[in-house]
Image (cartoon, rainbow, N blue to C red):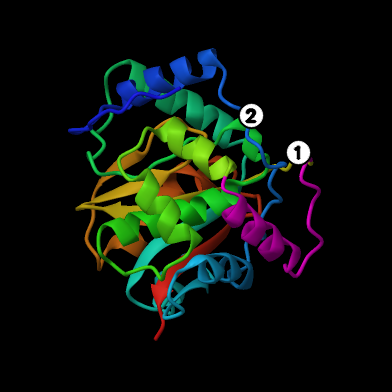
Amino acid sequence: FFELFEMSGKSPKWYIEEHETFLQKGCPSGTNPHWLPLESNPDVLNAFVHRTGLPTAWEWCDVFGLDEELLAMVPRPCVAICLLFPSKNISRPRRQEYKSIALEGNGKLVADDTFYLWQIEAFGNACGSIAAVHSVAANYLQGTFELQPGPLKTFIDDCKGAHPGEIGVKLADAKDLHEVSETSAEGGATETPDREDDTDNHFIAFVKQGNDLYEMDGCIGYPINHGPTTEDKFLSDAVKVIKDEFISRDPENPHFSLLALCKTA
């Protein structure tokens, strides 16, 4: 179904055209049932990543607010952000805007070693699990931390350098990761929505890839390079994008939630 390829810095247009071709061919349906949605709760995401191989010295932590005083409470180093947001007034218009940017030949190049997957239909409500995988993969492959032997390390190692569609299909079919995600979802503090429910909320990740800030959304078609950042400025730079491009589109909506992947021990 897929051809091997080499990336030497791909344009957003390349990703969008590949994504459209992928959808036109009819992506594989996957062998697992649709995934249950993960709650925006550090205990839930920690259960998923720790059971699959992330060392416990690294944890998801709540971000209690976006002003400087509350951001100062986030442990450092902070190497990824998971954003849960109400998608109705945000996702659809943003996806169209960024698709147009890409097809016009604009947008920053995507680094050749970026690990990115498309959220295929077979996933159902798997965006939380996908955001966690994007977060861990980006940092593991850049040497931020090692992963313990287990399903997550095996999956990332096997998919390194692969086509975004191939990675998406492999994750949808990854029985071991799917089972841990299901168990983690069922352990949340609130009632878990059904796997077939049409939820309005959507998870994405922000990571530092090389010296740039990337937005990783498996539904938008390509990793969005938001420009330069540093280890010290990563959190504040990600929060600026979140304020400017997400919260500003639905400012009265209280259903935004941020989790930060941090070293805590």
Residue 190 colored in magenta in the image: yes
Where residue 138 appears, x then y in whole percent?
34, 54
Mark 2 sits on what residue?
29
Query: What percent of the width, then of the height, locates residue 67?
Result: 44, 68
Structural crowding at the residue carrying mark 1, measured as other residues with C-alpha within 10 Å and reported as few (<14), some (14–19) or many (≥20): few
SS at badge 1: loop
Which quadrant of the rendered structure holds the C terminus? bottom left
Determine which quarter of the picture holds residue 89: top right
Residue 195 sits in quarter: top right
Task: Give the residue furthest to the bottom.
Answer: 265
Q: Observer-nearest residue: 264 or 239?
A: 264
Q: Which residues are magenta?
A: 174-196
Q: Are marks 2 and 1 in contact (CB under 8 Å)?
A: no
Q: Residues within 10 Å of mark 2 (few under 14, many from 20)?
A: some
Q: How many marks?
A: 2
Q: Amino acid at mark 2?
A: Ser
Q: Earlier in the sequence, mark 2 or mark 1?
A: 2
Residue 88 visible, this angle: no
Mark-to-mark CA distance, 2 and 1? 18 Å
Q: Amino acid at mark 1?
A: Asp
Left or right side of 231 for 18: right
Q: Which residue is mark 1?
A: 198
* Quarter where residue 114 is shown: top left
Q: Can residue 84 be found in the magenta stretch?
A: no
Residue at disc 2, secondary structure:
loop
Q: In this view of the protein, which residue sits in the foreground, 48 or 102?
A: 48
Left or right for 82, reference 77? right
